[in-house]
Amino acid sequence: MILNFSIQNFGSIKDKQTLSFEADKSDHLEEAYVTRCGGRRILKLALLYGANASGKTTVLKALDFLRELVVEPKSKKTDRLDFEPYLFDPDTPKQPTVLSIEFIRNEVRYAYRVEFTQEAVVAEELYAYYTPNKARIYQRTTDLERQFVEIKFGRKMTKSKAVKQSLTANTLWNNTVLGGYLKTNVDSKELQEVADWFKLYLKRMVQPQTSFEDLIFFQMEDGEILSSDMIPILQQADLHISDIVIQSREIVGRQEVEDFLSLINDHHSVMSKGDVIELREEAKAVIKKVMLEHTVNGEKYQLPLAEESRGTKRYYEFAGLLALFIKDPRAMLIDELETSLHPDLYRHFIVSYLLNTKDSQILATTHNRELLDDRDLFRNDAIWFTDKSNADATELYSLADFDRSVIGKKTNVLNAYKSGKLSGTPILGDTHIDLNHGKN
């Protein structure tokens, strides 16, 4: 689970900003929000509020970029890292970007830090905390002129000299050591633990336009999710869905399959949105379609998922994600969590997630302010804000950072936020627009 994450010189973020999932001393909503892992009290949810262009999404993108840097190493030394540093300053574009994260994997706390430019990873270090001591796994530096990587291993890396040389040789100057490890046929318990955490626990960022229909379909096909897992979630959302049915249609014969595939390439409209093709050998293709069954006045009707409303499709995807969160702990980054959801359904999803998961985490941006009007729904340390400084740089802070003179136990947080008392809201100008300004 994530303990904290720090960002410096990435996108709209100039100076170091840190978001923490560690719970404060409050026991408010303890059973819903807080889980214990590695001897720490850790939050399962963090919500980011802020004006448009204040840097909310940048926080998610930075963590998503760190994941990509680890699990998707570049294959060539000439490949550039696809990001932008803070650009509204003459010095920051020449300086390294720094990302660091602390997390717990199998009850061990790890601290990982990486510095990089668009050309190369400049420095990197990984430490583990084994009670009561902190142990270095490795520390890496890069000779930028020679494009050569040097790795100093700690005592925990009790591997042969040949293994260490192989790992160094496979770590390109624009790769992390963890990325180099994933390309190397060596065995390391510590490196595998950390690489697995980035790959298996920390998931890709979900954007408002991201569709999870295919993911949910293949998870159901593989038995990772059962329709019986999702149906209760969908029924509780008042969507009148009684079942999920996958319809199949076979095309048999080598020539028939080739003709059909050719037709798809020439006329994409032949396939309905939401259809999935499975090729089974050369002479058979199976077209599958997800249907949602609705029971109305005792009669059952099936409607293709593609024909459902945008909100129904979104919650169908979230129902699948929720089932995954419950069965297999993971961390998910979701931009604009409330997209296409009614405020009541949005609230229902958050409560369902908090009450039914244990070691999963969600970091999400949101503009839904209604949540802040009900203290039975949030903890102060789970609410975060982004705001812009005078230098137009993102500043990140928590509701828990305000003292009692600003936010007391009886303070209406929604009113405080709407009034600008907590910042993180847009400063808007006059609504009058003069298109003839400056003209005679």
Image (tube, rainbow, N blue to C red):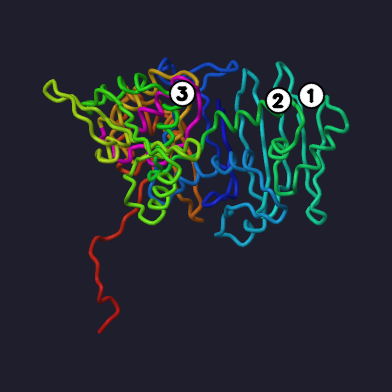
Look at mark 2 in the image and give the residue it sits on. Answer: 128
Look at mark 1 in the image and give the residue it sits on. Answer: 156
Label 2: how many Cα within 10 Å (few below 14, some 14–19, many 20+): many
Residue at the extreme left: 297
User: Disc 2 on helix, strand or loop?
Assistant: strand
The amino acid marked with disc number 3 is Glu
Q: Earlier in the sequence, mark 2 or mark 1?
A: 2
Tell me if residue 47 comes above or below residue 119 in the rendering. Answer: above
Label 1: how many Cα within 10 Å (few below 14, some 14–19, many 20+): some
Q: Between residues 135 and 398, which one lies in front from this camera angle? A: 135
User: Disc 3 on helix, strand or loop?
Assistant: loop
> Would you say 62 lies left or right of 435 here?
right
Residue at the extreme bottom: 440
Asked whether residue 319 is drawn in magenta, I would say yes
Tell me if residue 257 comes above or below residue 136 in the rendering. Answer: below
The amino acid marked with disc number 1 is Lys
Label 2 vs label 1: CA separation? 9 Å
Q: Nearer the viewer, mark 3 or mark 2?
A: 3
Look at mark 3 in the image and give the residue it sits on. Answer: 224
Res 7 seen here: yes
